[in-house]
Image (cartoon, rainbow, N blue to C red):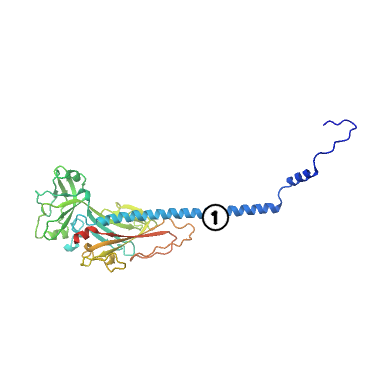
Amino acid sequence: MHQTPGSSPLPSRRPTGWSRARAAAQAGFTLLEVMVAIAIASFTVAALFALFSVQSRQLLRQDIDMEMNQSLRFATDMISRSVRMAGYGSGGWVYGALGPTAGAESEALPVIMPWDDPDGDAGPDAVTVTYMDPALVMDTSNQVIETWDTLTITFKPAFRGNALKLAQLNAGDLLMCSDYADPRGIRSYLWTITAVNATTGQVGVNPNDGYSDYAQWFTTNPNLTPIMTCSRAEVVTFYVDNDDDGVGAGTIENPVLMMSADQTWPDNDDVPLVDNIEDLQLEYCVDEGTMTADCLTAGSANWVTGRSINPGTDADNIWMVRIMLTVRSNRPDMRDAYPGQKLALSNGGAGAADNYFRRTMATEVAVRNLRLLAR
């Protein structure tokens, strides 16, 4: 506003209270207010971090538990499936390939062979099971009589799709044939296949005359029965590889459940199944000749450890198998707050505290093929 000479200045229209408020606003926070704000913010951040840490540990523990449970289920399923099949298509014992090169007939290969702590250090057990492949079962030709030291086993290719089944056999496979007509009882024979001709039906095999159990069985009759039921044989061994011997995938730091395609192990061609399987313990419910083995009663005396099994006399009387597995986490607790300790299963030894998380599962499986043979 323009002011003319001689006129008096206009009075100010701003109240004095506004000046004081502006001055107070420009003054900022007091030290006490800043300290209170910092304290509240620090408490909030600390609470959020603690909540985040707890949730992170819980999620990590859940992931570890889920991984361990999945490993246990898969390992148990693999072993249980083979144990259920043990003895399928056989008479309980298998003569010939994989049998002893010296000894008595009773030393033939049983269709379920327990190995109690093969390393002798209260460590994991192992088990070997033998059975026919159900998809490849076929009968030999009734027009060919072969001697016990034969180099060929003959089938009829045109009979019930045998040609397709023969085409699935390969050199190096094991051929199991069972003779159900022998008056002395069912006998099952095992050969190693050398060649397969799906057109003529002839399967070349290695002779079994080097195995004492097989040779002793044919001391009175040198011929095989004309009609035998045959299939590719599955001979599978499950064991835990937990040493640094350079053979197999397992180590002390990373024990692995392994599967071998025979009863000779460990080998570099064995198949790793599940990591971090730390212990495998096996118990067996053995019938004592009464055919009333009470396998389901808690504390039954019929349950024995593998160490009590005599493969020469008891293996064909196994009614049930109890499979006990321990899996551990793939790494210890990062805070070393969880003590962690391998528990003793059956006659297996316990371990010292090592901060690993662990889970244990026990499953009982009926060896139904042997029970059917017993009836």
Q: Residues within 10 Å of mark 1 (few under 14, many from 20)?
A: few
Q: Residue at x 50, y 53 (%)?
A: 55
Q: How many marks?
A: 1
Inspect this view and state whether residue 28 appears.
Answer: yes
Q: Residue at x 51, y 55 (%)?
A: 54
Q: Could you say which is closer to the camera, residue 285 or residue 108?
A: 285
Inspect this view and state whether residue 264 appears.
Answer: no
Question: Image check: 212 left or right of 14?
Answer: left
Q: Residue at x 80, y 42 (%)?
A: 15
- Which quarter of the rendering shows the N terminus? top right
What x and y, as percent, mark residue 263? Answer: 25, 57
Question: Image check: 375 left or right of 73?
Answer: left
Identify residue for label 1. Answer: 50
Q: Residue at x 16, y 60 (%)?
A: 213
Q: Could you say which is closer to the camera, residue 304 or residue 151?
A: 304
Single out the residue that lies furthest toward the right. Answer: 6
What x and y, as percent, mark residue 173? Answer: 22, 50
Q: Could you say which is closer to the camera, residue 117 or residue 30?
A: 30
Give above or below for 154 relative to 119.
Answer: above
In the rendered image, which quarter is residue 208 located in? Answer: bottom left
What x and y, as percent, mark residue 356? Answer: 43, 59
| Amino acid type, mark 1 | Ala
Give above or below for 240 relative to 195.
Answer: below
In the rendered image, which quarter is residue 23 located in? Answer: top right
Label 1: which secondary element: helix
What x and y, as percent, mark residue 17? Answer: 78, 45
- Which quarter of the rendering shows the C terminus? bottom left
